[in-house]
Image (cartoon, helix red, strand yellow):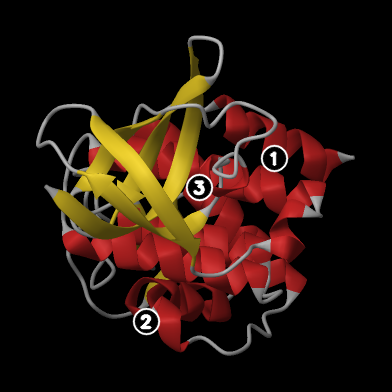
Amino acid sequence: MLKEVEGFIFKETPYGETSKIISVFTKEYGLISIMCKGAKSIKSKDRALTLRFTYAKFNIYYKENKLSLFKSADIIRPLKNINSDIILISYLSYLVDLTTQVLKQSNDETIYEDFINTVLKLEDGLDPLVLMNILELKFLDYLGVGINLNECIICGSKTNIATIDGDKGGYICLNCLTDERIVAKKVIQMLRMYYYVNIKSISKLDIDEDTKNEINFFLDMYYERYTGLYLKSKDFLKNLASL
């Protein structure tokens, strides 16, 4: 049956001499595979419509749990800014890899909305590090290792929060503080904002470098300690940042 789905191409895989299979994260069906006959050919009108990182409406012959068949597509928004910037491409590559792992754990429809809205904000020129961290924080719940942002991770106190610690796994109050890295109160406040903000509603991100870096440091440590994920695309991003 011919269906129209909204989606974002995560991956292209060559198939034969002229065809390819695309992996598309769709709003309606989650992550699906679509056969695109002849689309690998240089002369094909479908070649540009089936490239990685394409955000479009796809007309497909949908087959549940099987390989669907591509008919046509209409671009929703060309991602010209992202595709012309190696740094933004690197951020998007990591977000695609991370989302792929998240989808192995959950098919919650919010995952699609958060991912697409993050991509569109990247295209609009908002801070890629902050956007990445916001999505990383929101995705922890789906990975089964969500952060408790309401109380001390050790004693449960809701007052006198002194810092956050990625290895311990959350907030630490003054009474439980030992040798943990102390962060500014703004970092603790902004971490909560990251978690609760509606990505679609973000119009600007005016956050100082120290706060951004502290939150990124915390999330890096937390992901390493609790998720078990190792993504080469994240290592590449870290290497870019160190240049």
The Cα atoms of the two marked residues, 1 and 3, are separated by 11 Å
Residue 168 visible somewhere in the drawing = no
Residue 31 visible somewhere in the drawing = yes
Q: Residue at x 83, y 40 (%)?
A: 242
Residue 115, position as x, y percentages in the image: 41, 60
Asked if residue 207 is positioned above or below residue 41 in the image, the reply reads: below
Question: Is label 3 in a helix, a strand or a loop?
Answer: helix
Horizontal side of 159 relative to 81 (left or right) equals: left
Q: Which mark is residue 198?
A: 2
Q: Earlier in the sequence, mark 2 or mark 1?
A: 2
Q: Which residue is disc 3 drawn over? A: 95
The residue lying toward the viewer, choosing from 224 and 63, is: 63
The residue lying toward the viewer, choosing from 66 and 29, is: 66
Q: Nearer the viewer, mark 1 or mark 3?
A: 3
Question: Is label 1 in a helix, a strand or a loop?
Answer: helix
Asked if residue 86 is positioned above or below residue 195 in the image, the reply reads: above
The Cα atoms of the two marked residues, 2 and 3, are separated by 17 Å
The kind of residue on which mark 3 rests is Leu
The residue lying toward the viewer, choosing from 44 and 34, is: 44
Q: Residues within 10 Å of mark 1 (few under 14, many from 20)?
A: some
Q: Residues within 10 Å of mark 2 (few under 14, many from 20)?
A: few
Residue 172, position as x, y percentages in the image: 36, 61
Q: Which residue is disc 1 drawn over? A: 237
Q: Earlier in the sequence, mark 2 or mark 3?
A: 3
Question: Is label 2 in a helix, a strand or a loop?
Answer: loop
* Residues at marks 1 and 3 touching, judged by CB atoms closer than 8 Å: no
The kind of residue on which mark 1 rests is Leu
Residue 99, position as x, y percentages in the image: 38, 45
